[in-house]
Amino acid sequence: MDKNSSIGKHMIEKAKKIALFWHISPDGDCIGAMLGLGKLLEKQKKNVSYFVPNKPSKIFDFVKHIKRLKSRFDYKKYDLLIFVDFTWFNRMWIISQANPEYFKDKPILIFDHHPDNGVDHGVLIKDVKSISTCEILFEQTHKRWPKLYDKDIATYFYLGITSDSGNFMFEKDHIRTFTNVLNLLKLEADKDLIVNNFFRKKSLNSVKFLQLLLGRIQEKDQLLYTYYDENELEEYNIDTEEAAYALHIIQNIDGPEIVLFIRKIGDIVKWSLRTKKIDCNRIANGLWWWWHKLAAWFSLPVKGKFEQQIKEIVKFIIEMAKTEH
Ligand SMILES: [Mn+2]
């Protein structure tokens, strides 16, 4: 990573016009990484543009300058393209599928912590041991540009670390994460803003939707699940991020070994899987596209009746979990 870090530094120094990209369904890490890095670049008199494949959730409306992000890429000439929090082109498929040729010969710099690969060119600053892209960015940029830091930048990077770590619940390198977070707090990261707006605040509609999904819970052997169809969100005037509140609640239910949260989005069924002890990496062999030890996400095309498809996959997962013991 060190060699690529200095190449990356050189690429940034050289570039005047920079486009930053984030992945589809941006999360707190992605948003914090884009806006934090973007502000650091703007302070160096760079011309920075921000692009997203789809609009961020309403839950991020509290984030300063969130409206700077444009959801339509302009395909103009940029000296440098920077991807944060993803390596796969697929994670921003709306942009890359519209004109994949555009990206083929462009200088690309990537900051990421996911294990996936798939970019055929570009300088990769990747650390899969890190809990978040914001952590990598903070470590890389604070020692390089300490004087450029301000309260906003510290708050952006704090948002990424706290959201990707589930507010410091997930297993990773605690000493590293807490050291970085302590340094961000010393730089006046606004922890209260994030706790109040990101972790505490819920709309009444999202609570009512939670009620609906709790009513749908099914239990089978050591597995618990609930589900919804995207079409149901409109009635409640909430988006998928707000609907994910149910996952945060059901994954903490005492008892079941595996928790599944299933959503039908267009012609795709998306699955979030959480386990207590069973290693997702092992039971998921070949089926998922992203996992760490106790969590996995995967997508399957809609096949037949939604509820029937759920039953079949649930059965498959129960069998996989059994073979592991
Ligand atoms: Mn991340």
Image (spheres, helix red, strand yellow):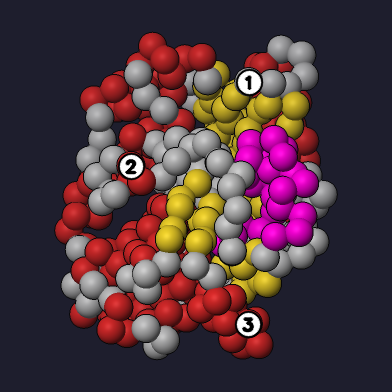
Q: Which residue is mark 3?
A: 7
- Secondary structure at numbered mark 3: helix
**Residue 237 quadrant:** top left
- Secondary structure at numbered mark 2: helix
Marks 3 and 1, the one that precedes in the sequence: 3
Q: Which residue is mark 2?
A: 67
10 Å crowding of disc 3: few (<14), some (14-19), many (20+): some
User: What residue sits 53% from the left and 51% below the top?
Assistant: 22
**CB under 8 Å between discs 3 and 1:** no
Disc 2 residue type (three-letter): Lys
Does the magenta run of residues contain 283? no
Left or right: where 186 falls relative to 109: left
Does the magenta run of residues contain 95? yes
Mark 3 against mark 1, which lies toward the viewer?
3
User: What x and y, as percent, mark residue 98?
Assistant: 69, 35
Query: Can residue 282 be seen by looking at this rendering?
Result: no
